[in-house]
Amino acid sequence: MNKIYLILLGILLPVNLQAQFDDEMPKAALYDNAVDIQIYTQMLAKDKLYLIYNLKKEQAGNELDYAMAMISENLSNIDLNEDNEQIVSKLNKIKEVWFKLNNKLTQTLTPKEFTNLFFEVNTFDRLVSDMVLKMREVYDLPEKNLDKYNDIQNLRRLIQKINLSYYANYLGLSKSFQHEYQKNIDSVSQFIKSKSNEFLNDPVAGQSFADIIVDWNFLKANLLSKMSKNPKTVFSLVTAIDFKLKNIKNTYVKEWLKDF
Amino acid sequence: MKQLQIFILTLIIGFNTSNAIAQISENPIDVLSEKLLQNELLTNRFLKNFVFVKTNTFKKKALADMDKSIALFDDNLSYIILHLPYDRKVKEDFLKLQNFWNIYRINITDFEKDNYESLVKKTYRLGKYIKQLNKDIFNKHPDYSKNKKSIEIAQLNASNGKKIDAIAAIYVLKKAFHIKDAASYFDIDMGSMKKNLKKTGKLKTLNPKAKNLITDLKTTLESIKTLLDKEKYNPKMMYAYDNVYTNKTFKLLKFIIQTIK
């Protein structure tokens, strides 16, 4: 009897249940996808460097796979949902560079080859940033928490950049990393100083942000310590901070998308 | 019991058909083709999601995709039964598929079990039922012959998407669960997939946007091939490539179906 019931149920199910694979993604979600790519880009450069030197191999390997998978998926989401010609033309360039970069990232690289890869990562990052700017210009993005969202995402990006330049400096790879490194530490410090109150009073970020400040202070002490240099600790702290920042940003995005 | 079941279903089908004939004559083959081919494309997606959930790879996404896929499959089946103006054979095929699906749906969402081999066989059977039903409906549809080319091209792409899901599932079954013979149940010749895309590109009436999709699909196919050739097991990348390929195929199907009059 159960079987008959199931069959009847199957037949009488409402025909208009909406579950299409081609449902259009809201622009706010596409924007979030694009900004996330910027963070994954920094992540993968850092992870590749850790992998080349066999440090934090498992975590870096997992994070690299994740970052690459998410970049592919996010690019595809934008591709499937974007009709604006200016954005599409930028996206096409990004896809071209990504295809090559993607292949390179799966290869075993020497430290010297990493420097070349780093330039390609920078090119990719520039192209993505350019698309993000165009999206900001063209899209009618939700106003609520947009500035805070951008701040949090920028912080995530900076933290990843700091990790990469810290390790590159530690390895003595290139002088260009040194300048980047100091600049990014200053930016984060400045941000924490000027925006702490705003984020500590924010109903979404609140307590998490207090934890982030504690983590950042500990990370900063590690970064600036002349006594001990420990890229493993830096990697773990950066992962922990990113996780908390990501949760805050996801809550903002969830609020944007709840009406869709 | 079985006779009673068939009797009730025949009554329902008869009732629904009488309601639906007017709609069929208004807009029949393109909408029907989309539903039939979407379900063909979805055939291996359930198994794929099952194995990704079990290996904890993008688990949340795989679970969400499982729900979405089941809902779409159900929607399409409901549509098909409401628009079944055909003969007894088609109705029997539908009944077989519907019966099988009702049980399969329960099995494939039972994540407590590790019955991979049984699920592979059941997925294979699901594919067989869908293929048979689709073949019967298309062959008996009055507008099929004049749209044969477009429908065949759409079928080739549904089949490509289906194969990619199978490849992703086999990849995980083999590497994570050491089930080596899963591949023997699926036709996964990647060379033919490339040819299918080439044929699709030659469809003259296709929207220019579809040409970009075809280029992307070719690139993704190459990336999947490279991933399969590599020694390193990378389920996250496989999940992403599979998603990119199948989601773009859904869109491509829409463009191809637009060429059906």
Image: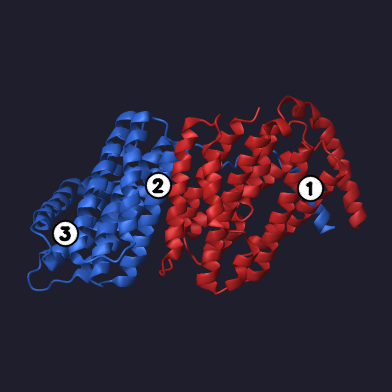
Chain colours: A blue, B red
Quarter occupied by the N terminus of chain A: bottom right
Coordinates of residue B9 in the picture (x, y in percent): 86, 46
Residue found at x 30% / y 58%: A104
Task: Name the side, left or right, on which A198 lies relative to A229.
Answer: right
Residue found at x 30% / y 30%: A137
| SS at badge 2 | helix
How far, Cα to Cα, is label 3 from label 1? 61 Å
Other-residue count near label 1 (Cα within 10 Å), few / some / many at <14 / 14–19 / ≥20: many
Residue found at x 55% / y 40%: B200
Q: Which residue is mark 1?
A: B94
Q: Which residue is mark 3?
A: A165
Other-residue count near label 2 (Cα within 10 Å), few / some / many at <14 / 14–19 / ≥20: many
**Which image quarter: residue B134?**
top right
Chain letter of the residue carrying label 1: B
| SS at badge 1 | helix
Coordinates of residue B143 in the picture (x, y in percent): 74, 31
Is label 2 in contact with label 1 (beta carbons under 8 Å)?
Answer: no
- Looking at the image, which is closer to me, A131 or B65? A131
Q: Which residue is mark 2?
A: A74
* Residue type at the position of mark 2: Asn
- Looking at the image, which is closer to me, B218 or A16? B218
Chain letter of the residue carrying label 2: A
